[in-house]
Image (cartoon, rainbow, N blue to C red):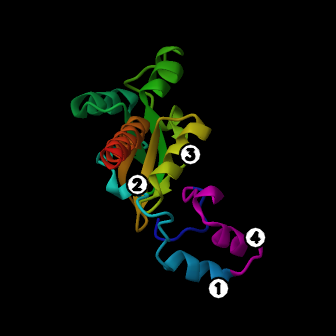
């Protein structure tokens, strides 16, 4: 996952790009795309936080050939409700959540000791770059109706973001802003 073109595993939605990046892609200007991808991303309004500034959890990652039983055992040991799956090239290829286990394994009465996670995982999950604004990551999760979002930096998965962390961060920031407002008014 060192570049952003080619394989569907490198699924970066267009909404994670700025409008300038989107226009460059639409116009097919590969030189401008290369420049925009290599340049640091603008942070937008002052005080907006990026995903990497949130308290991120290290992602639990297993090969896609792992059995569902072993994946569940590892999830329980780490006390997590999602894990990421990698293919033979160590590239992100899927995600398995507690909801997937309930709806795709238990409800279908699959043999957990023989079935590989690749049969029940969500393939090619959406992810965000580490310099994506936290509010953009939250919007992706709300619009996509999912709770977990892999975070990628320099082509490698560095963390798994949970929607609860984004919400707690937003609430804490609003509370701090309200306190500052009260202090200024007093």
Instruction: Compute the Cα span from label 2 to label 1.
Output: 27 Å
Q: Is residue 57 left or right of residue 132?
A: left
Q: Is residue 63 visible?
A: no
Q: Is residue 54 left or right of residue 64?
A: left
Packing grade of label 2 (10 A; few <14, some 14-19, many >=20) is many
From the image, tell me which residue sits under label 4. Answer: 26
Q: Quadrant of residue 16?
A: bottom right
Of marks 2 and 3, which one's residue comes earlier in the chain? 2
Which residues are drawn in magenta?
A: 9-29
Q: Is residue 104 above or below residue 63?
A: above
Instruction: Compute the Cα span from label 1 to label 4.
Output: 13 Å
Q: Is residue 76 above or below residue 25?
A: above
From the image, tell me which residue sits under label 1. Answer: 31
For the residues bearing labels 4 and 2, Cβ distance under 8 angstroms: no
Instruction: Compute the Cα span from label 3 to label 1.
Output: 28 Å
| Number of marks present in the image shown | 4
Of tags 4 and 2, the one toward the viewer is 2
Instruction: Compute the Cα span from label 4 to label 3.
Output: 21 Å
Of marks 2 and 1, which one's residue comes earlier in the chain? 1
Q: Nearer the viewer, residue 79 or 109?
A: 79
Of tags 2 and 1, the one toward the viewer is 2
For the residues bearing labels 2 and 1, Cβ distance under 8 angstroms: no
State the image coordinates of residue 90 (x, y, percent, origin top left). Answer: 40, 57
Is 150 included in the stretch rendered in magenta?
A: no
From the image, tell me which residue sits under label 2. Answer: 51
State the image coordinates of residue 149 (x, y, percent, origin top left). Answer: 46, 45
Q: Is residue 76 above or below residue 155?
A: above
Identify the residue at image location x=33%, y=56%.
53
Of marks 4 and 3, which one's residue comes earlier in the chain? 4
From the image, tell me which residue sits under label 3. Answer: 140
């Amino acid at each position: 996952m060192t570049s952003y073109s080619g394989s569907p595993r490198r699924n970066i939605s267009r909404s994670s790009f700025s409008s300038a990046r989107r226009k460059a892609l639409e116009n097919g200007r590969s030189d401008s795309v290369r420049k925009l991808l290599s340049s640091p991303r603008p942070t937008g309004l002052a005080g907006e936080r990026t995903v990497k500034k949130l308290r991120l959890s290290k992602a639990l990652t297993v090969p896609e050939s792992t059995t569902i039983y072993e994946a569940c055992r590892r999830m329980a040991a780490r006390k997590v409700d999602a894990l990421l799956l990698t293919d033979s090239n160590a590239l992100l290829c899927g995600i398995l959540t507690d909801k997937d286990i309930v709806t795709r394994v238990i409800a279908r009465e699959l043999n957990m000791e023989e079935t590989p996670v690749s049969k029940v995982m969500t393939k090619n999950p959406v992810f965000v770059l580490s310099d994506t604004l936290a509010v953009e990551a939250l919007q992706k999760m709300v619009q996509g109706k999912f709770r977990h979002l892999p975070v990628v930096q320099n082509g490698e998965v560095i963390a798994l973001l949970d929607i609860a962390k984004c919400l707690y961060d937003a609430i804490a920031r609003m509370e701090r802003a309200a306190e500052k407002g009260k202090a200024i008014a007093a």
